[in-house]
Amino acid sequence: MGATVITITSGKGGVGKTTATANLSAALAMRGKRVVAIDADIGLRNLDVVMGLENRIVYDLVNVIEGSCRLRQALIKDKRVENMYMIPAAQSRDKTAIRPQDMVSVCDQLRPDFDFILVDSPAGIEQGFRNAVAPADRVCIVTTPEVSAVRDADRVVGLVEAEGKGPPLLIINRLRPQMVHRGDMLNTADVLDVLAIELLGIVPEDEAIIVSTNRGIPAVMENNSRAGHAFANIAARLLGEDVPFLDLEAKPASGWLGKIAGFVRRS
Amino acid sequence: MSVFSALFGRREPSSREVAKNRLQLVLVHDRVDLSPQKMQMLRDELISAISKYVEIDVEGMQVNLTQNNRHCRLTADIPVLAARPKR
């Protein structure tokens, strides 16, 4: 059959696209899948450092597209996990160096040899975004529970649907249960209410992500951090497993029943 | 906000509720690319169009953009006072 291409995008920058790409790629590979992660953020390369592969780069995505190397030469093998590869973005170029059809062609060449191709999209809704979305079978939108990120995510939902890519999936990243608990952060239901797309996963804010990024070891590979666990669950859902969502906002319950319950508890 | 919060005279809305309400409002306009200014123009033109046929209560008139699962709906609730007398 060939690989499923999943593009990770967001609209707003800094919400955790690259972290999600690195962790989901690693988690899928750890589940025995053949995975390649592609950094489509031309000129602002980062997937390499987040995955800890920055010292192994010889060729990049633009070299492949321009024909100055063969595709296989740009595939960096991650030695820590079986069957995991990464193609870095070019650092000294900009997003006009590639076109949407180039991304489609690169992914089509990779499809026969992999189960999953994860494309890390740049922020924004310009050409870089269109390049990243072009080869996608599914699009996954990352947002944080903040008004600016959710607003931008909504814009991207519309653009993804306009590209004929079907309804995107949602990852809510960096949720802070204590803030949700005291009513100072949008909860999962709020974000879903507003965006009205299917939830793929919820990832709690977790210092372990900063530590793992410092070391260049995706959290799913390393420890049993809460965020790592959440990403492993998302990978399992991508494999078709029915994994319950982490209960990050156990109480008080939301909705009017919860409010009555909360009121009764308080009185 | 629910009826219950009103009944129990709750404190001012949490920042979460404020955020959600603001988002819903801004997104409904983002999605159809209709700014509050344009909405006002639309409302004014509705008034002048409908007033040709019936007398309406402009004060009680409500024109809203609402959303349900990414589908936007423009609703106008216009109280009619009387038919225009035939000439």
Image (spheres, coloured by chain):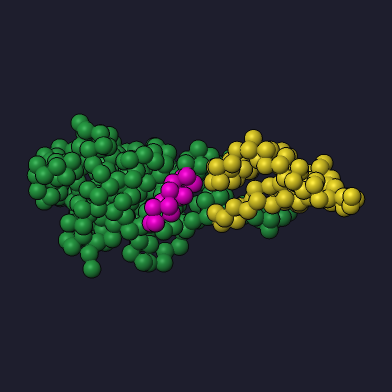
x, y (%) of residue B69?
Answer: 56, 57
Left or right of A27 in this view: B72: right
x, y (%) of residue A58?
Answer: 11, 39
| Residue A126 sits in quarter | top left
Question: Could you tell me if residue B14 is visible in this image?
Answer: no
Q: Is residue A155 magenta?
A: yes
Left or right of A257 in this view: B50: right
Q: Is residue B4 magenta?
A: no
Q: Nearer the viewer, residue A61 or B52?
A: B52
Residue at image coords 18%, 41%: A62
Residue at image coords 23%, 68%: A1
Above/below status of A201 relative to B47: below
Question: Could you tell me if residue A190 is visible in this image?
Answer: yes
Q: Main secondary structure of the magenta part?
A: helix
Q: For chain A, what colour was chosen?
A: green
Count of numbered labels shown in the rendering: 0
Residue at image coords 77%, 48%: B50
| Residue A217 sits in quarter | top left
x, y (%) of residue A87?
Answer: 19, 46
Q: For chain B, what colour was chosen?
A: yellow
Which residue is at the far front? B87
Question: What segment is highlighted magenta in the picture?
Answer: A153-165
Left or right of A235 in this view: A51: left
Left or right of A83 in this view: A95: right
Above/below status of A181 relative to A169: above
Above/below status of A211 relative to A194: above
x, y (%) of residue A177?
Answer: 52, 46
Q: Nearer the viewer, residue A247 or A111?
A: A111
Q: Nearer the viewer, residue B57 or A95?
A: B57
Residue at image coords 27%, 37%: A95
Q: Nearer the viewer, residue B49 or A151?
A: B49
